[in-house]
């Protein structure tokens, strides 16, 4: 490499042809200030809204390039080749009464050039509070700072209690969540009035469970619920599986096709698409899919045995066509709500459950969700997460 002909600075790096002639190759790239954060069991690139173009129609193309989509390897971007690491969050100070920041979530597909904002990500939501504090969008309060977040995707409010020391969000602590090595600072999250996040109704069709006809597979019983996010519940046994499967499920093409057809039909019933086959490209993030089975022993992603006694339900989630390696927090809240309401598939499997805490055994371990109910009205769903800043600076795109 002939470095004597390299002229570069942070604003414009370019290689110039030597004196023998030739055209100049302009290597200038666009750059955007950003922060790379882990929130729960997911990671995302965080942007200040003011640092992005005013024309939001330009954002999807930017986000695709940031992540390196479409490419199964996402080798030319920040994406991590799975749905939980191909995410973007856009944050701004809010002018809504009683709200600190507005948060808009984007799921960036991996192999399809699509950016989907039809649903929220509960795990990434947990990083919004720490980000807002450290970026000066919220006045820090020593000890615990309450951050009230308005999620633009669902028009719902999340209250986060973030530990703060010396004016900054704490990263270290003794809280441990399944799916993340080690411990971190505890973040208490409360999804307020989560019902009807996208459709305005807890049960969009008015039914707690219903049977749909799945082309090529026959009838399937499902529960469709809209709570923090639109979610459908399917019994593991109706798919011909145990419910303890891990990533090997992704290789079972027949079962995955069965799940996707169920998801597509329910997406149409939710009103997200006008043909069930279009859900594969037009509604990749909504509805979410949860597979439910009775509490049972299984080995998690780390090879550790999770005992029946540690959980109330055994659950698995499908996110953007693949098994989620943990469990989305919005789906956890929806599962907790369905568990507390008689007549749903989840309640049928669990049986009467008097405790407000529902323990969910998922691919990485067990997550507790604390439900506050008034009869069948969902007042609040609470979870504990950890989050931390991993990197900040600029992301460059071509």
Image (cartoon, grey):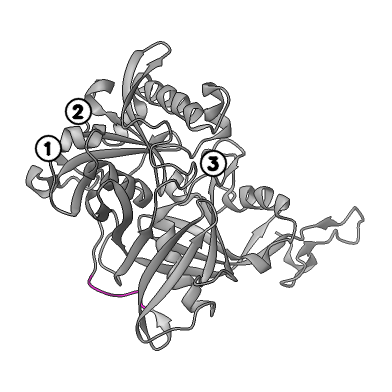
The reply to whether the magenta stretch includes residue 308 is no
Which element is circle 3 on?
A: loop
Pointer 1: residues within 10 angstroms few (<14), some, or many (20+)?
some
Q: Is residue 106 left or right of residue 222?
A: right
Q: Residue 387, relative to residue 345: is it above or below?
A: below
- Residue 261 percent location from the top left of the image: 43, 22
Quickly name the residue at label 1.
296
Whether residue 92 is visible here, answered yes or no, is yes
Quarter of image, res 159 = bottom left
**In this view of the protein, can residue 244 be seen by the observer?**
no
Element type at marker 2?
A: loop
Q: Which span of residues is magenta-colored?
A: 170-174
**Spatial distance from mark 2 to mark 3, Cα to Cα?**
28 Å
Rendered residue at 76%/58% (across/down): 27
Q: Nearer the viewer, mark 1 or mark 3?
A: 1
- Residue placed under numbered mark 3 in the picture: 109
* Residue at x 86%, y 61% (from the top left corner): 18
Percent across and percent down for residue 305 are 12, 45
Residue 229 is drawn in which quadrant? top left
Foreground of the two, 314 or 378 = 378
Which residue is drawn at the image coordinates 11% and 39% (left, top)?
297
Q: Overall secondary structure of the magenta stretch? A: loop
In the image, taking residue 272 as reference, residue 246 lies left or right, namely: left
The answer to whether the residues at label 2 and label 1 have Cβ atoms under 8 Å apart is yes
Membership of 173 in magenta stretch? yes
For marks 2 and 1, give the CA distance: 9 Å
Q: Which of 350/10 is in front?
A: 350
Q: Is residue 146 above or below residue 14?
A: below
Q: Which residue is mark 2?
A: 242
Spatial distance from mark 1 to mark 3, Cα to Cα? 33 Å
- Looking at the picture, does residue 104 appear above or below residue 270? below
**Location of residue 128 in the rendering, given as x and y in whole percent from the top left corner:** 46, 66
């Amino acid at each position: 490499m002939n470095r004597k002909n390299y002229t570069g600075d942070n604003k414009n790096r370019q290689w110039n042809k030597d004196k023998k002639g030739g055209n100049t190759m302009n290597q200038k790239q666009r750059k955007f200030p950003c922060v790379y954060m882990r929130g729960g069991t997911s990671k995302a690139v965080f942007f200040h809204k003011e640092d992005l173009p005013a024309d939001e129609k330009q954002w999807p193309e930017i986000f695709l390039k940031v992540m390196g989509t479409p490419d199964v390897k996402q080798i030319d971007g920040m994406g991590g080749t799975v749905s939980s690491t191909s995410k973007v969050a856009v944050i701004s100070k809010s002018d809504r009464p009683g709200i600190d920041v507005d948060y808009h979530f984007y799921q960036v597909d991996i192999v399809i050039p699509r950016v989907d904002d039809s649903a929220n990500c509960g795990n990434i939501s947990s990083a919004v509070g720490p980000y807002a504090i450290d970026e000066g969008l919220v006045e820090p309060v020593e000890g615990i700072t309450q951050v009230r977040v308005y999620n633009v995707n669902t028009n719902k409010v999340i209250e986060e209690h973030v530990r703060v020391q010396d004016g900054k969000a704490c990263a270290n602590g003794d809280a441990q969540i399944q799916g993340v090595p080690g411990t971190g600072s505890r973040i208490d999250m409360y999804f307020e009035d989560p019902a009807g996040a996208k459709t305005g109704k807890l049960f969009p069709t008015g039914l707690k469970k219903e049977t749909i006809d799945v082309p090529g597979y026959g009838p399937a019983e499902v529960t469709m619920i809209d709570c923090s996010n639109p979610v459908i519940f399917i019994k593991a046994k109706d798919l011909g599986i145990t419910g303890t499967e891990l990533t090997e499920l992704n290789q079972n093409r027949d079962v995955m096709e069965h799940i996707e057809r169920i998801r597509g039909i329910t997406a149409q019933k939710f009103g997200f698409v006008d043909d069930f086959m279009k859900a594969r490209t037009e509604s990749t993030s909504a509805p979410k899919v949860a597979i439910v089975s009775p509490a049972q022993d299984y080995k998690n992603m780390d090879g550790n045995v999770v005992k029946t006694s540690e959980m109330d339900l055994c659950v698995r989630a499908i996110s953007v066509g693949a098994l989620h390696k943990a469990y989305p927090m919005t789906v956890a809240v929806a599962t907790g709500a369905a568990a507390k309401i008689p007549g749903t598939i989840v309640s049928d499997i669990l049986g009467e459950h008097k405790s407000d805490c529902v323990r969910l055994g998922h691919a990485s371990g067990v997550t507790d969700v604390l439900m506050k109910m008034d009869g069948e009205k969902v007042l609040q769903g609470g979870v504990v997460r950890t989050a931390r800043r991993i990197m900040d600076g600029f992301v460059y795109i071509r």
